[in-house]
Amino acid sequence: MKFSNRLKAISASIAALFSLTLITPVVADPPAKVSNGVMMQGFGWDSKAGGDKGNWYRNLEGKADDMKAIGIDFLWFPPVSRSVSDQGYLPGDYYDLGTAGNTTFYGDENSLKSALKTLNEKGIVPVADIVINHRCASHQDKNGIWNIYNFASGKAKWEQWAVCSGQFGGQGKPDTGDAFPPAPDIDHTNAQVREDIIEWMNWMKKLGFKAWRYDYVKGYAPKYNGEYDAGTSPLFSVGELWTNMGFSGSTLNNDQNFHRQQLCDWLDKNKSEVACVFDFTTKGILQVAVKGEYWRLKDSEGKPTGLIGWWPSRAVTFLDNHDTGSKQNHWPFPNNEVMQGYAYILTHPGIPCIFYEHVYDWKLKNEIKKLIDIRKANKINSTSKVEILKAENGLYAAVIDGKVAMKLGNKDWAPEGDAFKLAASGNNYAVWAKATKSSTRSSSVRSSSTSRSTSTTKKKTTTTQKKKTTTKKKTTTARR
């Protein structure tokens, strides 16, 4: 009888444990290769090799060895499908990658395959730019509206039912995100649409792509990105969620918690275990901070003020891309302070993404490579711990993982003692690394005559926003 009762108790415990595993979601992060890696956006706006269209893939392939030497682990390609706009962001036939006699802006299918093969052989992961919020049609309907998709490939053949209602004669369901006026928004609630997108993305994997960058993700519900990841198993994915930050006139508000909350919310609703998002909050704050307002880089809890302060394992940090900088220059990082920016993102948590134009067109390759070398030699990764020592006007100083110290700004600062050795420096920045492999964290500092730099953060949110943010942040912390 006693044995029977004991057996029942054990069975009940097992049942309870099993029940707990069913109702408690297990949330992973992207693998170590991603956490430890450095990404490069491999193009700008209107990128041409030697001034000619159609040679960009060959250009990237030709730089594969150099990119590997710099320390690049992931290379983000421009959109590869033929597009109404040269740059690739108004795609039509997903499967038309160009031919030798009729290339796309960047090249043809054979030159793309060759570049992907070479990069994979060098250990650089190709990242495809997935533009699926909208799609340009091949034919007009009886009313003269472009909403019929019947391309030469014969794939992803859609009609008005695949277009969101209320635009371009669409007969699908209402849009699940923001509209994109230049082209018909795709109805992602439609199972056939999702099936065709997943089929195309898996075809892209066969070409050699292993990860995804999702364009304009505010245009449709994030759960669909999770479904596309689940159906294609990328090494990782990263979404472009570019929303407005808070300003008072032309002045960036002090508190941008609501903005990084939006990034957290998108990640929460995207169930992919390898999903990341570009840290627009860090970009927006950092490019103001490097002008001297370094206090902006430390929040009320002593953490970095961007997404890297709340969910660093899923944050892809960057300074500029083809939209914010390059020829478009919609929201550029201050030109003279770019190396300050790289000194920050290449020593801090998150997954840093450097920009092709900064490396090759601006001739900053050697300075950027030195910072990447320091990051990798000291195993700084997406979840590294930051101890912010100074965050004030004219100075930002921090120690990362107890191994690397850095400063931004024109005020004097250096880590105390002989453990740290100067490893890189430039205009208003300096980075030190420990001479030994000691894991002892050094938090003592002293003033010195060394001139470098620092960063900070502003803050402004209503009481209601703060309460909401605090609650949500705890949710994402629990998931981490």
Image (cartoon, rainbow, N blue to C red):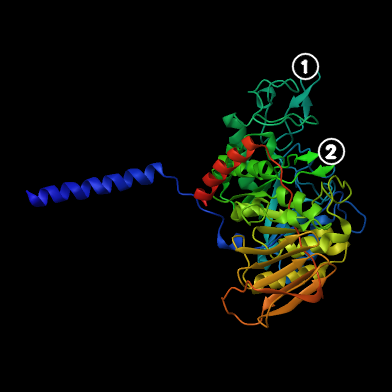
Q: In the displayed structure, does residue 313 sit left or right of residue 68?
A: left
Q: Amino acid at mark 2?
A: Gly
Residue assigned mark 1: 142
Q: Quadrant of residue 119?
A: bottom right
251 relative position to 398: left or right: right
Q: Return the residue nearer the eye: 40 or 314.
A: 314
Picture quadrant where residue 423 is located: bottom right
Could you tell me residue 283's position as x and y percent?
A: 75, 52
Asked if 191 appears above or below 456 in the picture, the reply is above
Label 2, label 1: how many angstroms apart (C-alpha)?
47 Å
Q: Residue at x 69, y 37 (%)?
A: 218
x, y (%) of residue 409? 81, 64
Q: Please tell me whether residue 197 is drawn above or below residue 278 in the rendered image.
A: above
Q: Are marks 2 and 1 in contact (CB under 8 Å)?
A: no
Question: What residue is shown at x 63% (from left), y 64% (from top)?
Answer: 387
* Residue 381 at x, y percent in the picture: 62, 64
Q: Is residue 167 visible?
A: yes
